[in-house]
Image: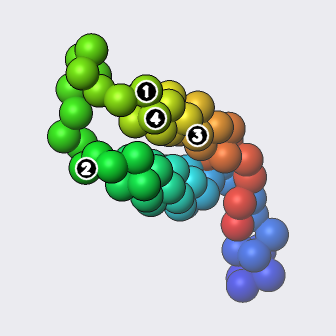
Amino acid sequence: MLLLLTRTARPGPLAYGICQTGCNTVWVACVAAAGGVAGVSTGGAGVPASILACNSAQGVCMAVCVAAGLLPTL
């Protein structure tokens, strides 16, 4: 029975969650390095370009997580 379970691969919600956690961790560090506080800016004209770049990079990272969630995992 254990052998059967270890050979089963399914799309990975665990991989998806780990990927999102990684994206969010890097995003918080990026925004902090740019002098901001993650989750505070609303994206208006007064937001520094460096923080907007962090937000854009996080969007790309999260999109990649969709692919990670579709990869087979044990």
* Labelled disc at residue 49: 1
* Labelled disc at residue 37: 2
Q: Is residue 28 visible?
A: no
Horizontal side of residue 46 vs 9, given as left or right: left
Identify whether 65 is placed above or below 72.
above
**Residue 24: x and y, percent?**
43, 52
Q: Please, what secondary structure does the residue beneath circle 2 have? A: loop
Task: Specify how the rendered protein is coloured.
Answer: rainbow
For label 2, count other residues whose C-alpha is less than 10 Å away and answer few (under 14), some (14-19) or many (20+).
some
Mark 2 to mark 3: distance in Å? 19 Å
Callouts 2 and 3 close, C-beta under 8 Å: no
Precedes in sequence: disc 2 or disc 4: 2
Identify whether 4 is placed above or below 32.
below
Mark 2 to mark 4: distance in Å? 12 Å
Disc number lying in front (3 or 4): 4
Classify residue 73 by image quadrant: bottom right
Residue marked by disc 3 = 61
Q: Amino acid at mark 1?
A: Ala
Disc number lying in front (2 or 3): 2
Precedes in sequence: disc 2 or disc 3: 2
Disc number lying in front (1 or 2): 1
**Residue 67: x and y, percent?**
68, 38
Q: Amino acid at mark 3?
A: Cys
Mark 3 to mark 1: distance in Å? 18 Å
Mark 4 to mark 1: distance in Å? 4 Å
Mark 1 to mark 2: distance in Å? 14 Å
**Residue 53: x and y, percent?**
50, 31
